[in-house]
Image (cartoon, rainbow, N blue to C red):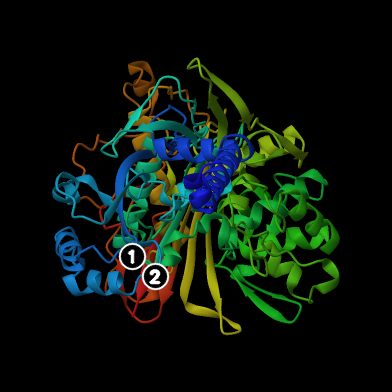
Amino acid sequence: MTKTFMKYRSRVTVVSSFVIITWVVLSMRLFQIMIVDGDGYREKGMAQAKKTEPIPFVRGNIYDRKNRSLTKNIIQYSFAYVPNPKVNPEEIATALSGIGNRSDDYYKNKILHASKFTYLERNVKRQDCISILQNPPEGLITLRNPRRYYPHLNIASQILGLTNVDDIGIAGIEMQFESYLTGENGWIVKQKTNGGALNPKNGFPSKQPVDGKNIQLTIDLDYQAILQAELLSQIDRAKAVGATGIILNPQTGSILAMASLPDFDPNRPGLAPIENQKNRSITDQFEPGSTFKIVPASAALDRNAVSLLEEFNCENGSFLYAGQTIKDWEDFGLLTFSQVMEQSSNVGVIKVADRLGPNTLHRYARDFGFGMSTSISLPGEVPGILKAPKDWSGITLAELSLGHEVGVTALQLALAYASVANGGFLIKPRIVNQIMQTNTNGKQTVVYAERPEIIRKVMPESVSKTMRDILVKAVDRGTGMNAAIPGWSVAGKTGTAQKFIDGKYSDKKFISNFVGFFPAENPQLLAVVILDEPAHGFHWGGQGAAPVFRKVMQRIINMDDSFKRVPQKYNREPEPILAEDPSMLKKSSKPVSPIVLATQNFENVQSGSGRSFVPNVRGMSLKKAKRILKKRGLKVMAEGSGQVIWQYPEPGTILSEGAICKIGLK
């Protein structure tokens, strides 16, 4: 070795060792990166070069029975913020203040106090935030999300329900069928460019979203709109607190319309009390009054406890039962069983129910569906109240037969009458027709359906037919005359019930209700109408609720060509004689009465016509008014005492003999 090498040997050794060690370390590190941790680094690299974005599903829509959309999905925008020291809060606050009624300080305060991802505004319509979308401030996160919209506003709002800010159903059908309406999000992988923009690349994976399923209801949008309009009109007219109505097909149990007022707009639920979101047709119970009388009447016919022409002494309108005096609205004497129902005699019905006894009356009330859930596919239904006979007091039999000491829902009452209309079967109500899933090929598959279902047989066909005949007479010449539709045979029953408040029945607050169906020979539509606390005069079922039934059904008949007029089995008034046989006139020894041409300013209608002219009794005493009206063949319903201050119908009206004239005294 040379002297020079020996001189620098230590240095060469150090440098060489350093190079070798460095190369070994780098090789080992490279081995670790490439081999040991290669998968992890490859994943990090891919993550930096691409981004997975969700593809939101579309919530299933709800349709009426004719496939008209009751809901829609629209795109709205939400704005959020993640803490970032480089962002100018004032710029974001100023931009957001232009889309609503909130001030800059509101948004600035939210931004300054944000410690994580924070929403600043949610579900803003595009037209309200288009300026921000076109020129977004730095640091503001914009989220595009679908949002539920109800195009018909208040129509069927309590049936449909609504969704919350996260588009999750919280009431009605939206909540009951949330699992069907909700879908599954998809995703797509996008490649990042050098500038940070995202572009889809064909080779990257993706998954298409699964949209929610569509629901077709049994509701008819036209029927629903008509029902709500007429209920609202009658609330204004009768100064009522609220109103409830149901229209259904008594043969299948399909709910065609269901409404309770006041209601709400699900697009802006905060503008109405949360109480208005309740579907009172199934959540609220009430004492129905005389509409419950079909229970003892049907039971008595089925058990052969009465005959149709059997007469009952109605005690001139006052009857002592279990130590309490029961009064009628009119001083009835002898009435046949049919007339007891036509005129809604309380005394007569109690005598019928007394023949049945507590156990039988209770059993038939249960068979009609009272005191139990109907199992309708809507949330919040109550079963009502029907006490067991062991819990009855001495007066309960009488009270129950008159529709007191029992709590029913509007839907239970409708289904009870449907069993009379359809031949004696209690049926399960249907609100959902079918639920459909759209496949990838665009075809729809039914995944759920509600079919007509019979729960039990309540009465034989013969009994239901007899009850239909009685209910037709109740409309033709009884308390339900205001529900009559010219040219159609209508069956129905009125009900008037005092509200039970603070442990006693109120003399000022009533429930006015009517249940009817038509055509009586083959019922296709049945409706329940209920008015809550209408003004005096409208509290009678025949005055408050029955006219609503008539108006609703007349509008439906005029709109729906599927209803064909059929010959009436019963006529409210006899057909007019258009011609006489001259030979018959010659043989008659009696003078021929002149034909009346005028319809005003006359005091007598042709004798033998079966019709009577309503005289003016205003200002008269009760005794004198009753005498004059009864002389004309009219029945009298009086309210108050003193002198007559109002009467209905108006003087000059022509009514069938036996019709009811109501008078108010003060």
Q: Is residue 596 left or right of residue 405?
A: left
Relative vertical location of residue 192 with respect to residue 16 in this rendering, above or below = above
> Where residue 195 sits: x, y (%)?
25, 38
Q: Is residue 175 left or right of residue 600?
A: right
Residue 83 shows which numbered tag?
1
**Residue at the outermost bottom position:** 502
Q: Nearer the viewer, residue 341 or 51?
A: 51
Looking at the picture, how far across and down is residue 36, in whole percent? 64, 39
Q: Is residue 629 visible from the viewing direction of this image?
A: yes
> Which numbered circle lies on residue 411?
none
Q: Which of marks 2 and 1 is nearer the N terminus?
A: 1
| Other residues around mark 2 within 10 Å, as few (<14) / some (14–19) / many (≥20) | few
92, 161: nearer the viewer: 92
User: Is 195 placed left or right of 388 in the picture?
Assistant: left
Q: Does residue 122 appear in this view?
A: no
Question: Which of the two residues, 387 or 465, is positioned nearer the viewer here?
Answer: 387
Q: Residue drawn at (41%, 19%), measured in percent from left and top?
A: 202
Using the rendered view, name the quadrant where residue 97 is placed. bottom left
* Residue at left offset 49%, top offset 65%: 511
Q: Position of residue 423 (x, y in %)?
A: 69, 33
Q: What element carries label 2?
A: loop
Secondary structure beneath dot 1 equals loop
> What's the amino acid at mark 2?
Ser
Q: Are marks 2 and 1 in contact (CB under 8 Å)?
A: yes
Picture residue at 69% right of the left edge, 38% below the top: 464
Identify the amino acid type marked 1. Answer: Pro
Q: At x 25% / y 35%, what residue is drawn?
A: 594
| Residue under label 2 | 115
State the residue lying farthest toward the front.
3
Q: In which quarter of the image is the C terminus?
A: bottom left
